Image (cartoon, rainbow, N blue to C red):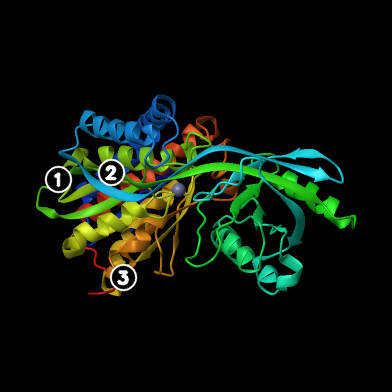
Amino acid sequence: MKNKMISVLLFAALSLSFAQTEAKSDNFSQVQLKQIEQLKQQALKSDLAWNLVESLTTEVGPRMPGTVGDKAGVEWAVKKFNALGFDKVWTEPVTFPKWIRNFESAAIISPSPQKLHITALGNSISTPKNGVQAQVIEFETLAELENASQRAVKGKIVFINYRMNRDRDGNGYGPAVQARNRGAVVAAQKGAVGYVMRSVSTAHHRFAHTGGSHYKEGVTKIVSSAISNADADQLHRLIALGKPVTINVNVQTKSMGEGTSYNVIGEFTGSEFPEEYVLIGGHLDSWDLGTGALDDGAGVAITMAAAKLAAKTKPKRSIRVVLFAAEEFGLWGAKAYVKKHEKELSNIVAAAESDFGADVIWGMESNVHASVLPVVRDIATMMKSLDVEHIGSNSAGGGPDLIPFRPFKIPVFKLAQDGTDYFNLHHTADDTLDKIDPKKLRQNVATYAVFSYMAANAKTRLVGKNN
Ligand SMILES: [Zn+2]
C-alpha cells in the first residue's frame, strides 16, 4: 500500500514537472501561456466565423470586383468590423481593370451535336454574336501547344486538356494555371480563332471553373474559356475517334475600363507597441459564379473572428485584419496596400493570409530571421493540440495577397489548410456556404487566434530575413 502511494505521488510529481518544462518559454509568461490555452478553448466553441461567412455569402452573395455585390461586400465588412468592436476601421481605394460576363454557351456542332458546359475566363473578349465556330485541335499541355506548328493550329479552336494533380498542398495548381494565364495568347500567336481549356480542377462534376486570364499586347485577342472536366473528357473521346470535331463557343463579356473598390481594414490597437502589428486577412472579392464561400468568404470570417478573440486580452502589439480587394483580377488590393504602406511595412511583425478554403489547418510554416526561430517553436508548441504540425523549412510564401510583400522580406507565416478537395469547387458556381464544415472552421479560427496572440505578445519581436 505504501509503495503504491509513493509511486502515485512520484508519478504525479513527474507529470507536473514535465508539464512545467513543456510549457516553459523565454518569450511568454505562465499567465500568457494559460491565456493561450483558454483562447484555444473559446475559439473551438465559437460560432463567430460561421455567423460571419453565413452573413457574407447570404446577405451579400457574389462579390466580383467593381460590381454591386462587391460594393455591398465593402459596406458589409465596415459594418461588421465596427459591430465587433475593432478600435480602428477604415477603407483604402483600389483600382483595377473592370470586366463582367453577360452570357456564355458552347456546343459540339459535328459529328455528334450536344451542349458543353463552359465558362468565360476572366478578361476574355466577346465572340461575335453567334459565337466562333471551327474545328478543334487538342493538346495535352501548354508546352505541347507551344511546340505545335502554325499550320496545324491556324483557323482552329485550341483545346488544352491538361489534367491537374490532386494534392494536399495544392501543388497541382501552379502547373495547371499556366494554361489559363497564357493559353489564349499562345494559341492566337499560332493563328487559332478561339481557346477552350479543361478546367483547372480536380472535380468529377459538370461545373466549369473560371479564373483570371491575360492577353499580350500585339497579339490578337481570341476568346478565352474553360469547360467542365466531364465535358473535356467527352470532347477528348470524340476527337480520339479520328473525325474532325467542330464546336461553337459563344461568350459575351464587357471590359468596363477602370473600376474602383476598397481594401477594408480593421485593427485592434496594441497596448505597448501600437505601431507594430500582426497582419492577417483574406480577400473580400470573389468570382461571380458562386457566392465565394470557400474563396474567400471563409478566410475573411476566420481572420475577423480570430482577431476578435485574440484581442480580448489587450495584446502588446496591434492586430490588423486586411480584407483585400480585387484579388481575383490580379492581386490589385494587395498591390495597392504595399504601395500605400511601403515606408512602414517594417512595422509588420507577422503576416498570414487565409485563402485556401475552409478545411483543417494541418501545418504551420514560418519565413523569419533565424534569430527569432525560438518564438516560432513556441507558437508551434501551442498549436500541437490543434493537430497543427511545425513545417520546419522556414521558407513560407504566405497566401496570394502576400506575394506583393515579398520584396520587403517581412516575417510571413503559412497556416497550411488541407487543400485535397479545394480545387473541386474553386471558382465554380458550386462554391457555396454548404461546403463549409463549421467544426473545421472553428479549428482554423483557433489556429489563427493562437498565431495572432503569440505574434502580438512575444517578448522578442518577430523580424524578417531582411534584418
Ligand atoms: Zn482566393
The residue that appears at 44% across and 41% down in the rendered structure is 286
Q: Is residue 336 left or right of residue 291?
A: left
In the rendered view, would you say 406 is above or below 350? below
Q: In which quarter of the image is the C terminus?
A: bottom left
Q: Say which residue label 1 marks.
A: 269
The disc, 2 or 1, on the residue closer to the chain's N-terminal end is 2
- Dividing the picture into quarters, in which one does residue 443 lie? top left
Q: Say which residue label 2 marks.
A: 262
- Mark 3 vs mark 2: give the one in front: 2
Q: Residue 132: horizontal and vertical position, in percent? A: 67, 48
Q: Say which residue label 3 marks.
A: 407
The disc, 3 or 2, on the residue closer to the chain's N-terminal end is 2
Whether residue 13 is visible = no
Q: Is mark 3 within 8 Å of ligand 1?
A: no
The disc, 1 or 3, on the residue closer to the chain's N-terminal end is 1
Taking the view exactly as shown, the residue that stands out farthest to the left is 272
Q: Is mark 3 on a helix, strand or loop?
A: helix
Task: Check disc 1 and give the amino acid type.
Answer: Thr
